[in-house]
Image (cartoon, rainbow, N blue to C red):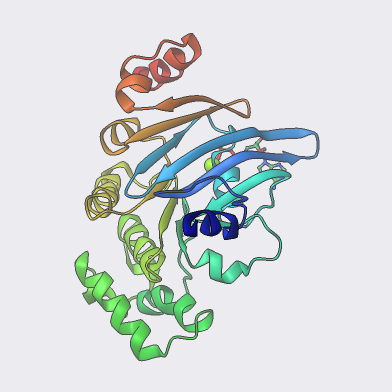
Amino acid sequence: MADEKLTQATPTVEHPPIGDVVLRIDNVVKRFGDNTVLDHISFDVHQHETVALLGASGSGKSTLMKCVNLLEQVNDGQIWLGDTDITDPRINMDKQRSRIGVVFQQFNLFSHMTVLNNVTLAARKVHKWPREKAEEKAMGLLRRIGMDHKAKEYPDRLSGGQQQRVAICRALMMEPELLLLDEITSALDPLLVGEVLEMVGELKAQGATILMATHEMGFAHDAADRIVLLRRGHIAENGSPYDVMDHPTDPETQEFFAAYNRV
Ligand code: ADP
Ligand code: MG
């Protein structure tokens, strides 16, 4: 009897069960004019999972990441961060953004600010942390990657690889539930790619939840738990690196990966 009452009192659950899903992309549509870039895209990223978002240039990887980071509005569908529908216009954007750490391909750091000020900026300005608290946290993050001695340097005194590692530190400041990495090694000298990917590998090993767009196929293969391949607005593949990259059955998918192996 008591159980029955409890059941009745439970409000209707309006969102799908989330479980350990950190990010749920649910039927997302994104158009620019009459160009439908994302056409009913759905997939989940689970806690501690690394998902590599692959696809030809122009397939919508960055657009999808911008929708997740609330830099672009979806035309239809929902994006759930944990149990929050972040496509609901009533949400607090700053609060939701602070749950996500973002690193882009380039132009991540402000050139007129020291490394330390770059890393602490959002914590101080958006989240109103006292400088001392923000700097202590930032120095801890920089120390972990052996960059604490560069805290007072300006970004142009750092290599591209060091700059991207600092940008990752900045993304980690608010202890985000999800990391979005959009081709973070694409603008780097090939010699500097390794140190950045190594840092991503360490974050993964520490349990981070990561959605990354990349053209580093070897890294995607070895580091990702799952591959999501975008093609003409749709998800062409969503599966393990073994299935999607090593044993693709779809001819277009075979061609996509073969093209990378030829270069
Ligand atoms: P990817 O990151 O996979 O290379 P993008 O998400 O950058 O792809 O782009 C996907 C498509 O959306 C492309 O056709 C691109 O021209 C278009 N696009 C991206 N941003 C805009 C924008 N702000 N306005 C109009 N079209 C855009
Ligand atoms: Mg892109």
Extreme front residue here? Answer: 1
To which quarter of the image does residue 30 belong?
top right
Instruction: Pick whichever, 262 or 120, lies toward us.
Output: 120
| Horizontal and vertical percent position of residue 57 | 54, 32
Instruction: Pick whichever, 155 or 116, lies toward us.
Output: 116
Q: Residue at x 59, y 41 (%)?
A: 26
Quick check: 25 above or below 98?
A: above
Q: Quadrant of the C terminus?
A: top left
Total marks drawn?
Answer: 0
Quick check: 93 above or below 192?
A: below
To which quarter of the image does residue 167 belong?
bottom left
Q: Residue at x 25, y 48 (%)?
A: 201
In this rendering, position of residue 92 left or right of residue 193: right
Quadrant of the image where one finds ligand 2 = top right
Quick check: 237 above or below 123?
A: above
Instruction: Pick whichever, 69 or 149, lies toward us.
Output: 69
Quick check: 54 above or below 255?
A: below
